[in-house]
Amino acid sequence: MPASSIAQALPYVNWVLLVSLALGSFGFAALLAWRTDATAGYVRFTAVCAAFLGLIALAADLGLPPPSQLMIVAPPPGLDVARRLGLGAFAVLAVVYAISLRRPARREPLAVVTIVAAAVTLVAAAAGWAPTLADAVPLLVQLPVLAAAAGGALAAVILGHWYLVTPRISERPLMLATRVLTAVIGLQLVLFVVWTTLGAGPAQRPFAAFDGESILFVILRLVVSLLFAAVLSYMAIRTAVTRSMESATGLLYIDLAAILAGTIGAAALYLSAGLLV
């Protein structure tokens, strides 16, 4: 990957990382509020963090340079506006959701509307940046999965800390969070095989990810952020079963670092080399 392409890709990589953390962490918090007895304090804190990350992502979005040396294209003005409006609406709605937690009847409809705003953001990003409509489809699959992994890992780490200060919480929220996170990483492994064998990126040939100059980054993506992260997530499940919450939180910290590294690597490979991994 040329140094100039990497340098120009950094703002877009930053966007993908921030949006993934924001959207994914909110999704996990809303899921735990719906399906478990997660405390309102945890859900509220995570939703507010998601909103804050969304606002930072929106600020970064407003300063994105033209992608002249990248594998993506400049989107039409309408999709630019839709992406930013969706991100701004998500941040506002996440705060409203956090405030509404005292009224359960309003909580779930607000969660759905917030997730719809998140979906608008991702659809506008994929449709606007992908070179062709055919390229937009796999990118639209990749972005939500990256968000579920990165944001889910962040939400799980926050939840682990909640157990350290409120030890009487049942293990159900952490069990569900770690199981869903493990399933998401498993889905990423399946997609990695599909993307690399079929060649799903812009102008990406089948198995091209393993014979170019980016092969080291592709292997690191597989080993560190997928295989290693899957093992860590499974270990977190096993420790949560025995209510070893300190151990589970430590494992989730390492898991978060591995997943974030993989999110950054996957975004950089797509933007700079057109490789979907």
Image: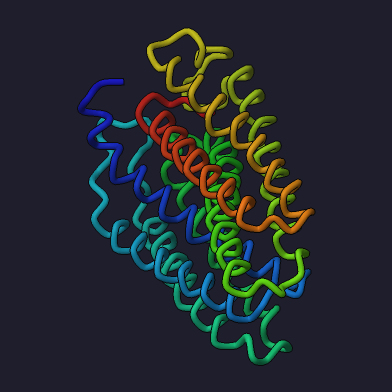
Q: Residue furthest bottom?
A: 103
Q: Quadrant of residue 68?
A: top left
Q: Is residue 72 left or right of residue 277?
A: left
Please give the count of numbered marks on the rendered protein: 0
Q: Is residue 246 left or right of residue 86?
A: right
Residue at horizontal 53 percent and vertical 60 percent from the top: 23
Q: Quadrant of the N terminus?
A: top left
Residue at horizontal 41 percent and vertical 43 percent from the top: 129
Q: Residue furthest left?
A: 4
Q: Quadrant of the C terminus?
A: top right
Residue at horizontal 58 percent and vertical 80 percent from the top: 41
Q: Please say if 69 is above or below 83.
A: above
Q: Position of residue 211 (x, y in %)?
A: 47, 7
- Applied colour scheme: rainbow
Q: Position of residue 259 (x, y in %)?
A: 52, 41
Q: Residue furthest top?
A: 211
Q: Is residue 38 left or right of residue 1?
A: right
Q: Please say if 50 is above or below 7.
A: below
Q: Position of residue 65 (x, y in %)?
A: 23, 46
> Which of the two residues, 138 or 236, is positioned nearer the viewer here?
236
Residue at horizontal 53 percent and vertical 29 percent from the top: 224
> Which of the two residues, 13 or 89, is positioned nearer the viewer here?
13
Q: Position of residue 162 (x, y in %)?
A: 59, 69
Q: Please say if 148 is above or below 83.
A: above
